[in-house]
Amino acid sequence: MNEKMLTKEELAVRLNISAYDVDKLRKTKNMPCVKIGRSYRFNIYEVEKFIKDLSIKKD
């Protein structure tokens, strides 16, 4: 497992949302992330699964 970990800014661009919204999802919906020092990193595969699971719960 040597996947690239994304910053919140990179993830925001990839998901077409703001960095603020990434933080909000991380804090309120428990978006999967890893804390490294004072910043967070996101595995895109885990985030995509998280979003898919969220959309299934809403249906």
Image: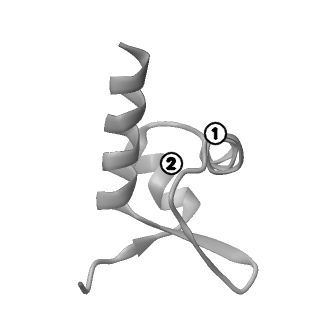
Residue 8: horizontal and vertical position, in percent?
Answer: 57, 59
Q: 58 or 15: which is nearer to us?
A: 58
Q: Crowding near pointer 1: few (<14 within 10 Å), some, many (20+)? A: few
- Alpha carbon distance from label 2 to label 1: 8 Å
Identify the residue under disc 2.
12
Q: Residue most toward the left?
A: 1
Q: Residue furthest top?
A: 59
The colour scheme used here is one colour
Q: Is residue 59 left or right of residue 42?
A: left
**Among the two numbered marks 2 and 1 on one chain, the one whose residue lies closer to the N terminus:** 2
Q: Position of residue 42 (x, y in %)?
A: 47, 65
Q: Amino acid at mark 2?
A: Ala
Amino acid found under the numbered disc labelled 1: Asp
Q: Give the secondary structure at mark 2.
A: helix
Whether residue 51 sits left or right of residue 19 in the image: it is: left
Q: From the top left corner, tell me how far across and down residue 4 is, in percent.
A: 33, 77
Task: Tell me where residue 57 sits by quadrant.
Answer: top left
Q: Position of residue 20 (x, y in %)?
A: 69, 44
Residue that badge 1 annotates = 21
Whether residue 34 is situated above or below residue 8 in the rendered picture? below
Please state, as top left, top right, bottom left or bottom right, where the C terminus lies in the image.
top left
